[in-house]
Amino acid sequence: MSDLGDHAIYELDYQGIVDPDRARIIAIIGNFADYTDPVARAEAFARVQTLLQFKALSPLTSEPAQWVDRSSLSGGRELWQSKRDPDAWSRDGGSTYYMQSQTDAPYQSQIVP
């Protein structure tokens, strides 16, 4: 096992984590330990961290297939939710949007040619 793997096992043991998640966690750590290039490992980690938070890896676009009509939640007023980032909501089909977790400051979607 790598230093990273050994560290993970020690910490899991110290916390008394012995459930089925333990093997999954060790497998995930093992996958990261397989990276020999620290830059590639850091980039992969950043992507995985983003995806685990259900966030998009690139800017949201106004592409209709990326937005779900949620007008039924707003009494029939036009309301769209991003499939790529469920925190993003739009009143115009994705041309502009706001992040529910932040202020209602609008963002501009990238235009899809």
Image: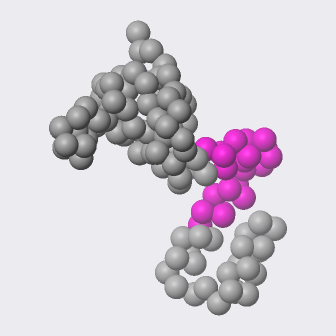
Identify whether 16 is placed above or below 98. below
Q: Nearer the viewer, residue 10 or 72?
A: 72
Task: Please tell me in which quadrant of the rendered image residue 2 appears.
Answer: bottom right
Q: Is residue 42 left or right of residue 110?
A: right
Query: Does 101 lie within the magenta span?
Result: no
Residue 5 seen in the figure: yes
Q: What stretch is highlighted in magenta?
A: 27-47
Residue 17, position in %: x, y? Answer: 61, 85
Identify whether 74 is placed above or below 66. below
Residue 4, position in %: x, y? Answer: 77, 66
Residue at 33% from the left image edge and 25% from the top image edge: 92
Q: In this view, does 57 lie to the left or right of 14?
A: left
Residue 69 seen in the figure: no
Q: Which colour scheme is used?
A: one colour
Residue at 50% from the left image edge and 22% from the top image edge: 108
Residue 46, position in %: x, y? Answer: 66, 46
Residue at 61% from the left image edge and 44% from the top image edge: 47
Quadrant showing the N terminus: bottom right
Q: Nearer the viewer, residue 53 or 6?
A: 53
Residue 11, position in %: x, y? Answer: 73, 79
Quadrant showing the C terminus: top left
Residue at 58% from the left image edge and 47% from the top image edge: 50
Which residue in the rendered view is the most extreme toward the bottom? 16
Which residue in the rendered view is the most extreme toward the top? 113
Q: Which of 46 and 90 is in front in this view?
A: 90
